Each structure stands twice: as structure tokens, then as C-alpha cells.
Image (cartoon, helix red, strand yellow):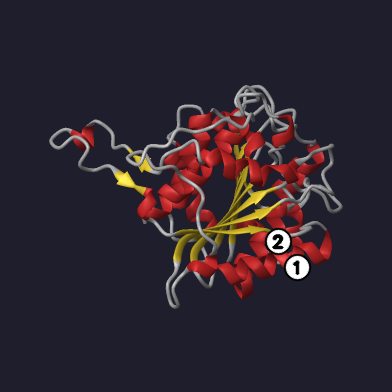
Amino acid sequence: MADVALSNDPLWPRAGDWPAPESLDPGASARLALLGVPAWRTSLSPTNAHTTPAAVRQALRRYSPALVPDRQSTAREPGRDTVDLGEQVVVDAGDIVEPDGPEGEARTRARVAELLERAETVMAIGGDNSVTVATALGAYGDRLDTAGLITIDAHYDLRDGVSNGSPVRRLVEAGLDPRRIVQIGIADFANSAVYARRAAELGITVVHRDELHGRRPADVMAEALEIAGAAGGPVHFDIDVDACDRSVVPGCPASMPGGLAAWELRALVRAAGRDPRVVSADLAEVDASVDTPDGRTVRLTALCVLEFLAGVAAR
């Protein structure tokens, strides 16, 4: 995405440029902590996904932190109900250095756990989908036996080995009950029959992409949360951006025509953010280095940060 000079208007503040966690007063907490996790070394396809956290931070500056209410809510007092997310306390913890491999994952787990002592939620900006494992385990802590997982993904991520195609399988092997896993957006021609059977045998709840047509994203997410949060433990939310249609996310190498619309992804993310059982999330599978000149993939990813924050603010 081309670097352009942005206008300066004191009445039109920009999102992003959030302070470090160390800036918090003693005893204070944040609603959301961002953490860059630029993993890329185990990706099944060539990627420069490690360039994405910096690109997302830059893209956030293109947006304002204001939520404009719909016409129905402003029928009597237009503009009165506008929400300024700039009033929410958000911190940016920077990037994990070399997050790939066992040592990198250990650093990520520890940092996520540390951040959740000072923040209500943590959002990891990847990086490839391998970031889901360390981020989720860091958030689950000693509550893995009651934890849940929701993914937005065209893929099952149940592959053997250690890669961006295996995070769900690795979490199950770590002790996550697969009956509290919900996968939204699974697509035809993006998976093998073996892994489809594996998901069914494990008892994972799968919501096929075609099942989403005509359904309200908030309703889909509500059902997913009832399953993932059934035991009352923490829920991790994995947002694999390549679940979207390739026209809106050309910077996702595995995206396909016919995926989710941008508005669907945004609505699902906000709905998940509203639920207090969701304590952590990750944004994955964006390669900023191959995005289009208008930066549409990275811009949508940045909007997902704001949508998640909007949900958290509405709790």
C-alpha cells in the first residue's frame, strides 16, 4: 500500500497510534491490547506475512474511531448517539521478535498471558495462521479444560505437522475439547475429504460458507458462542482473512472467489467482540507485500481491529 500524506484535522481524529501498555497508570487496565505476531516461516505457501503487522498499523491511520448510529437510532436526535472509540483505552504492545518455532511460540504465549493481566482482551495481528496456537494457549492459561475456539476460515486447519495449516489440530492435541470448536466459512474445493472426515470424527461444529447466505452474521456468531462458550471458559477467536472473497482480499494467497463479503466478515468480528467470553483474537493469513496498490486487503484487516474494538466497547 502506497505511503501517502494524510490530512490533519483536529476535529477528525485518526485511529491507531495507541500507546504501549507501560503507559497505563498503576492498577489501570485497557479494553484491548494489540500484539504483532509476524510468524511466517512454517507457511505451506511462500509468504511475507511478517510484513503485515506494520502495514495494518499504518492502515489504521486512514480511519476515524467514530461509530455513526443508524437512522433508526437517530430518528429524534441525529448525531447524539455517535460512539467515539477514541475514548476506549487501547494499548499496542509492539511485535514478538521471531515468533516462529517453539521458543517464539513460548514468547508469544507468555506475552499474551501478561497482557491479559492489564487488558480485557488481546488481539494478535499476524502473520500466518500458525499464530493461533500460541495466542490461544496464552489466553487460555490454566483454563484449557473449559476453553472454546471459533474460527472464520475456508479451511479446517487440521493438517498433520506444524504449519499454518495445522493450528486447530495442534490445539486439540494440546487438550482443547473439539466439541467446543466452531468453524465458520468452510468452503468447497479448499479442503480434502480426509480432513473433512477428521473434523466430523472430532465433533467439530462446521458452518459451511453456503449456510451463511441469507443469515444475519450476528445470529451465526451467537450460535457459535453458545457452543464454544458452553463450559464457561475463555473463547479464542481466529479470523483467517482468506475466508473472504478474493476480490476483497487479493493479499491473501489462499483466498478464493465466492468467499465471504467484506461486510460479512466485519459483522461477524463485531458480534464476537461483544461477547465477554471472547478474551482473545487473531488476524491471520494476510501478506501485505502482495496486496493491490490500493491496499484493500490490509485496509479490511485494519477495519477488523476496529470492529473488534467496537464490539468490546459495547459489552
> Which numbered dot is residue 73?
none
Answer left or right for 272 relative to 125: left
Between 312 and 172, the one lying in front of the other is: 312
Quarter assignment of residue 34: bottom right
Count of numbered marks: 2
Please tell me which residue is depicted at 80% across the width and 38% down the height of the picture.
47
Please state the horizontal and vertical placement of residue 165, each as a whole percent of the image.
78, 45
Between 166 and 128, the one lying in front of the other is: 128
Please state the horizontal and vertical placement of residue 164, each as a whole percent of the image.
77, 47
Q: Check disc 2: other Cα within 10 Å, few if <14, some if 14-19, many if 20+.
A: many
Please state the horizontal and vertical placement of residue 115, each as a whole percent of the image.
57, 68
Please tell me which residue is depicted at 45% across the width and 33% down the height of the picture.
7
Answer left or right for 248 relative to 13: right
Q: Is residue 131 above or below residue 245?
A: below
Quarter assignment of residue 276: bottom left
Q: Is residue 145 in view?
A: no
Please tell me which residue is depicted at 22% across the width and 33% down the height of the picture.
72
Q: Which residue is mark 1?
A: 106
Please tell me which residue is depicted at 20% across the width and 42% down the height of the picture.
80
Q: Decide: marks 1, 2 in contact (CB < 8 A)?
A: yes
Answer left or right for 85 relative to 6: left
Q: Amino acid at mark 2?
A: Ala
Q: Is residue 246 above or below residue 163?
A: above
Answer left or right for 44 relative to 129: right
Between 241 and 85, the one lying in front of the other is: 85
Q: Which residue is mark 2?
A: 134
Q: Amino acid at mark 1?
A: Ala
